[in-house]
C-alpha cells in the first residue's frame, strides 16, 4: 500500500531544498509538486550538483539513506517523489 505524503511534508521538503541551495527568488508555493526538479518548467532551475546537495540534505534532515545512485536519481525527480520516499521511510522505521 502506498503512503500518501501530506501537504505539510511537501512544503517542508520545498523549504529544505530552497534553504540548502540558497534559492531566495522563488516562492515555495510556486513550485509544482509534479514537475521534474531538473529541467522542465519547474520554478527552481536545478542541475546535477544541486541533486547531490539535495540528497545530502534529505539524509541529514530525515535520517534516510540513498546509497544507490540510480534509486536516488528516481527519488529526487519531483517534490512528490521525494515526499513519497520520505513518508515511506518514516513509516518503515
Image (cartoon, helix red, strand yellow):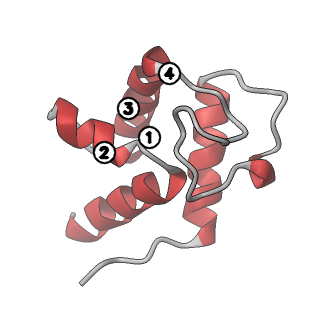
Please give the residue where the numbered disc 2 appears in the rendered image: 74
Which mark is in front, 2 or 1?
Answer: 2
Depth check, mark 3 against mark 1: the one in front is 3
In the image, residue 45 lies at what x, y percent?
Answer: 65, 28
At a point 43% along the width and 77% down the height, the residue shown is 4
What residue did someone put label 4 on?
50
Residue 61: mark: 1
**CA–CA distance between discs 3 and 2?**
11 Å
> What is the x, y in percent for residue 19?
66, 30
Tell me the residue that label 3 is attached to.
55
Q: Quadrant of residue 22?
A: top right
Quadrant of residue 81 in the image?
A: bottom left
Residue 83 place in picture, x, y as percent: 45, 58
Secondary structure category for the residue under label 1:
helix
Element type where label 4 sits in the image: helix
Describe residue 58's horizontal placement relative to residue 17 as left or right: left
- How far is the residue under mark 2 from the one under mark 1? 19 Å
> Front-most of 54 and 62?
54
Q: Position of residue 10 (x, y in %)?
A: 58, 59
Give the camera-side residue of 85 and 12. Answer: 85
Residue 65 in view: no
Residue located 51% across and 20% down the image: 47
Going from N to C along the chain, the mark reached first, 4 or 3, is 4
Against 52, residue 4 (above or below) is: below
Within-10-Å neighbours for mark 2: few <14, some 14–19, many 20+: few
Q: Which residue lies furthest to the bottom in this view?
A: 1
Pointer 3 or 2: first along the chain: 3
CA gap, disc 3 and disc 1: 10 Å
18 lies above or below 78: above
Q: In this picture, is 13 found above or below 48? A: below
Task: Give me the residue at 40% from left, 42% from top.
Answer: 76
Say the numbered circle drawn on residue 92.
Answer: none
Amino acid at each position: 500500500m502506498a503512503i500518501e505524503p501530506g501537504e505539510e511534508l511537501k512544503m517542508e521538503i520545498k523549504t529544505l531544498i530552497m534553504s540548502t541551495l540558497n534559492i531566495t527568488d522563488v516562492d515555495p508555493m510556486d513550485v509544482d509538486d509534479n514537475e521534474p526538479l531538473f529541467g522542465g518548467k519547474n520554478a527552481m532551475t536545478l542541475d546535477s550538483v544541486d541533486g547531490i546537495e539535495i540528497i545530502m540534505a534529505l539524509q541529514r534532515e530525515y535520517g534516510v539513506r540513498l546509497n544507490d545512485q540510480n534509486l536516488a536519481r528516481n527519488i529526487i525527480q519531483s517534490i512528490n517523489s521525494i515526499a513519497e520516499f520520505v513518508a515511506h521511510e518514516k513509516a518503515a522505521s
